[in-house]
Image (cartoon, grey):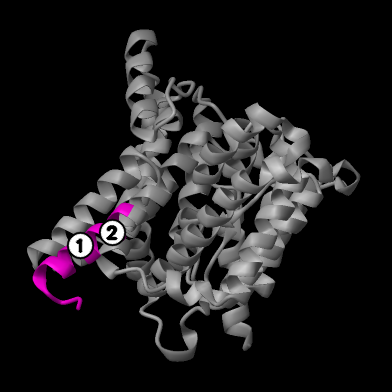
Amino acid sequence: MNLHAMRKDLVAGLTVAIVALPLALGFGITSGMTAAAGLTTAVIAGFLAALFGGSKYQVSGPTGAMTVVLIPIISAYGVQAIPMLGVLAGVFVILMSILRLGSTINKTPWAVVEGFTIGIALIIALQQMPLILGQAKGEGDKPLTVAINTLQDAVQSGIHWNSILIVVLTLTVKFAYPNVARRLGVTAHIPASFIAIIISTLFVIFSSSKVETIGDIPRGIGSWQGSALEFADISKLLWPAFLIAILCAVESLLAARVADGMVHAQGEDRFKPNKELTGQGIGTIAASLFGGMPATGAIARTGVNVRSHAQSKYAAMFHALVLVVIALFFAPVITLIPNAAIAGVLLGTSYRILNPTSIMETLRTTKSEVSVLAVSAFVTVGVDLVWGILVGVALHYLLELFKGNIK
């Protein structure tokens, strides 16, 4: 790799790390574990899944979808079940790779992928509602329900306009910076997300705006949990582990496929589905054994990685290493970043993931494809990711059978 490409990967890794940090901490807490568990997952799974995986752009770690699956499992079996659960799930994912199921999963019809992508983008946007409003997360177990309840709570308790202002500022800088930099003749590539976070943070500091910031960051990265493995629990954890493995495989492969679509990857640049499963399985096993949790490809962070002009898998590996450095040396600085700025970056990313141009092209195709896209998106948001894929695929083949394209 040449120096220019390596520099782009370094900058992309740094940008993704800044976005990934609060998400990792938050997902660690909301899953029923700890902030340290989320950070450990982002570092260990993020590095190993990139190293052994088959995508040039995928960024892995704790995700909202995985958190939704883990919450009832941890409630039923306790945090002590996570090491064995992660090992079993990782083994299942690696077995999928050995059986070459990655290629099969990757043949998911494109209308389903588009619907899944739209659903994920909407979920990412909905998940930002508490940060946008500076409000505690509302009740509910679905993103839309949580967002609505959060908005209602904010209206009743009073809107935090400072948080909304920071979101608007972040989005304005994020979308305006590329044109401004071009007009000023700036040749060095600095991701707009990175600039937006810096400007928003400085604005909060110098204006003394009262907004929530990231806060304290744990400085420890992982501790061996292998001694907590309870082999007597294998039988009762097999099914939950299998569900986690399915989610990991589906979300990771589709996120990698979407990333390839964002960069119009061709030939050897396209991701290798079965190799990607191997990387995800290894990352989940290692993270779970060192105090983390099962991981998956993270479409939001992957989207930021692509938009930050990552050139190779080194960007995702750099992101993991930057998180280690941040946790050990720069925690006091990072604590100053406003949560609303992170929300603004992710809102911008969800818009990019939506790709309105691609949606309009799809809407001009057959009615059956539009139906598959719409249903996949609706079920992804309203039910969950796995059902969004399953229902979308089933509808696609039913419509094909009805049209006589399947014999």
- Which numbered marker is on residue 303? none
Which is more toward the observer, 244 or 302? 244
Instruction: Indicate left or right for 250 with 378 as reference.
Output: right
Residue that appears at 82% across and 47% down: 222
Q: Amino acid at mark 2?
A: Ala
Residue that appears at 32% across and 38% down: 382
Q: CA distance from mark 1 to mark 2?
A: 6 Å
Residue that appears at 20% across and 76% down: 406
**Residue bearing the label numbered 1:** 398
Regarding residue 234, the answer to whether it shows in the image is yes
Residue 195 lies, in percent from the top left, at: 48, 54
User: 10 Å neighbourhood of mark 1: few (<14), some, or many (≥20)?
Assistant: few
The answer to whether mark 1 and mark 2 are in CB contact below 8 A is yes
Q: Answer with the quarter of the image where residue 333 lies.
A: top right
**Considering the image in quadrants, where does the C terminus appear?**
bottom left
Instruction: Judge whether residue 404 is colored magenta.
Output: yes
Residue extending furthest toward the right = 227
Secondary structure under badge 2? Answer: helix
Q: Amino acid at mark 1?
A: Leu
**Considering the image in quadrants, where does the N terminus appear?**
bottom right
**Residue bearing the label numbered 2:** 394
Residue 310 lies, in percent from the top left, at: 52, 72
Q: Magenta stretch?
A: 391-407
Considering the whole magenta stretch, tell me its main secondary structure: helix
Residue 24 lies, in percent from the top left, at: 62, 44
Which is more toward the observer, 105 or 114? 105
Q: Answer with the quarter of the image where residue 216 lies.
A: top right
Instruction: Indicate left or right for 295 with 174 as reference.
Output: right
